[in-house]
Amino acid sequence: MVTAIRQAERPTRVVVVDDHPIMRAGTQAALEEQADLAVVGVAADGAEALRLSDALRPDVLVLDLGLPDISGVEVARQVSATSPEVNVLVLSAHDTLGNVRSLRDVGVRGFVSKLASGDELVGAIRRVAAGGTAISVCRGSALSTGGAGSKDAAGDEPQESLTAREADVLQLLAGGRRNMEIAAELSVSVNTVEFHVRHVLAKLGARSRTEAAMRARELGLCPATRDRTAA
């Protein structure tokens, strides 16, 4: 019983990996403000990240993709293969659908934009530490479906980037909100929402709101919720 109580009270152990000193220190400081999180190690490159992950076995590895020696994707792949109990959460400035897909394939449990708030990062860490997943790229930044001239997995024509506002609409649409609710949430008119929805559907190659919501969920962009997307 005592052991169980101590386990419940133990803070979530986090290792932060980023090659930029200011970003690394800022992330560490933000996490250390939380009583239930403990930063047990920091690293500036992939080799050190792998060493700390193996030696410390943290609950969550917060990982930047752009490391100077080993790519963040390769670090995530190795950690997931050798230390599956370590939950990898990527914190990156590169918000593309292709990144989200490839990272999920190598075992990453969470993806948070560097444009996200500290509260979003903290919430994502708590979710992946509890065994869930956390994708936070829909709000606050423009999303690319893969970059200029790229094609989707099915080999279709290149798709355009979603603007920040279109990404906002997509997240709310995928959450089951109706146009009137989206308009109220974003403080815009219903006509403006309808305009953005048409663009989102076209850019995702979706024929309906429901299909757009399903595509967003399949790509890991937005959490699966009870479907209320019928107009």
Image: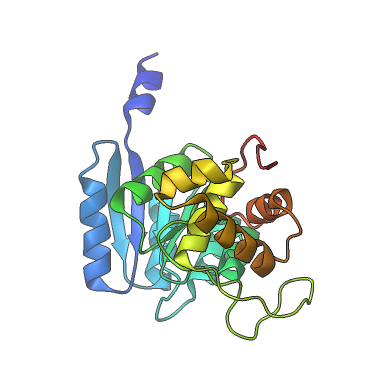
Badge count: 0
User: Residue lying farthest top?
Assistant: 1
Image quadrant occupied by the N terminus: top left
Where is residue 181 drawn, in percent x and y?
Answer: 51, 41
Residue 169 seen anywhere in this rendered image of the structure: yes
71 versus 40 height, above or below: below
| Quadrant assignment, res 224 | top right
Q: Is 118 on the left-hand or right-hand side of 134?
A: left
| Pick the front one: 204 or 32 | 204
Colouring style: rainbow
| Pick the front one: 8 or 169 | 169
User: Residue lying farthest bottom?
Assistant: 149
Where is residue 69 drawn, in percent x and y?
Answer: 43, 80
Residue 57 seen anywhere in this rendered image of the structure: no
Residue ID at (58%, 48%) = 173
Image quadrant occupied by the C terminus: top right
Where is residue 177 drawn, in percent x and y?
Answer: 56, 41
Where is residue 43 drawn, in percent x and y?
Answer: 32, 66
158 versus 171 height, above or below: below
122 versus 16 height, above or below: above
Residue ID at (47%, 47%) = 183
Q: Is 176 on the left-hand or right-hand side of 189?
A: right
| Quadrant assignment, res 44 | bottom left
